[in-house]
Image (spheres, grey):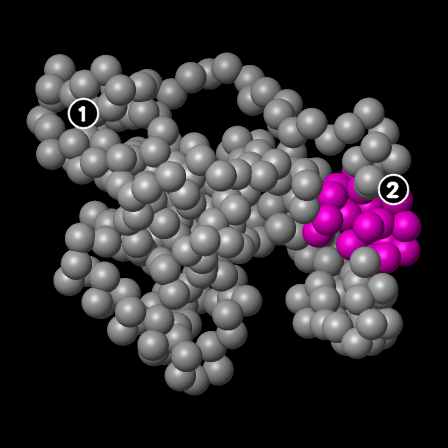
Amino acid sequence: MIGYWYLLGLLYRHLSPRTTVTSPYAVIRVDPSTITNREKALYVDEPIDKWANMGEVRGGDWDKSVKPLISSRKYRGVINHFENDIPWEETNIYQESISRIQNGETHWNGCQTLKDVEQRTQEIEALYQTIRNEGFKSQEELHGKSIRRLLLNPLFDRSMTDPTVCIDRDGGLLFGDGYHRLAIATVLNLDEIAVRVVVRHAEWQEIRKGVKQVESVDELSERSRRHLDHPDIREIIPDELQPVESVATKDEPSHDRGDSATSINK
């Protein structure tokens, strides 16, 4: 019942200042090409866990320490394989996994043997085909159950999560988890994917609160007005404050993937 303990932690945070104004289970729809950095606090300092910290508001400078998403071997491996036709065996993530397994370690989502690594690549191949043929679906769409019900299931699996992000003080999306799905969405040039927000910066949360409380755009600060079309804002503002959508063509993803498969795979 590990999911039950996550829910208890969420209840505690709702009784403290470290909480959010909307359901922490809700997903927002974002353009995957706007996610270009990952949050280093996920791994150092005060860690951010995709389930244990869901719904948290956090101040401080954790959002200033970021790494390029393309620095992830998992992310690069998927890009190289599906976009640049690089065999799995020649990707860094595959080679590192084999090396670590030979040293007695577990790597790449629990792989302990060469057979595990091969099975992992087959699973990603199947995931790619599913997303390409059926579109990108949220966990609720896939399982027909709410995230809350999934958490209360005795068979709850931590991997049953939508891609996660944190949001920095200026509304920037910092990647958290779901490397393979995000990379596949990038390769397929999807317009949007469902992500779950784990932690919001306290300054960003204040912008959200301000937007939700006003009755007219005229009451908003200039900074808040700039964010009215942000996916984390659109979900909470009334129709009369909704900005007019642009008809501009979606730009190409802004990732710097390198000049060649060789450069990206280093």
Residue 221 placed where, x, y %? 18, 19
Please tell me whether residue 2 is drawn above or below residue 94 in the rendered image: below
Please tell me whether residue 125 is drawn above or below residue 107 in the rendered image: above
Task: Determine the CA span between mark 1 and mark 2.
Answer: 47 Å
Q: Are marks 1 and 2 in contact (CB under 8 Å)?
A: no
Q: Residues within 10 Å of mark 2 (few under 14, many from 20)?
A: few
Determine whether the residue tagged by mark 2 lies in a helix, strand or loop.
loop
Q: Residue at x 82, y 40 (%)?
A: 266
Quarter of the view holding residue 32 = top right
Residue type at numbered disc 2: Asp
Q: Residue at x 83, y 32 (%)?
A: 263
Residue 118 placed where, x, y %? 84, 67
Judge left or right: residue 32 versus residue 113. left
Q: Which residue is mark 1?
A: 240
Q: Which residue is mark 2?
A: 85
Is residue 256 visible in the rendered structure shown here?
yes
Point out the stretch of residues depicted in magenta. Answer: 73-95
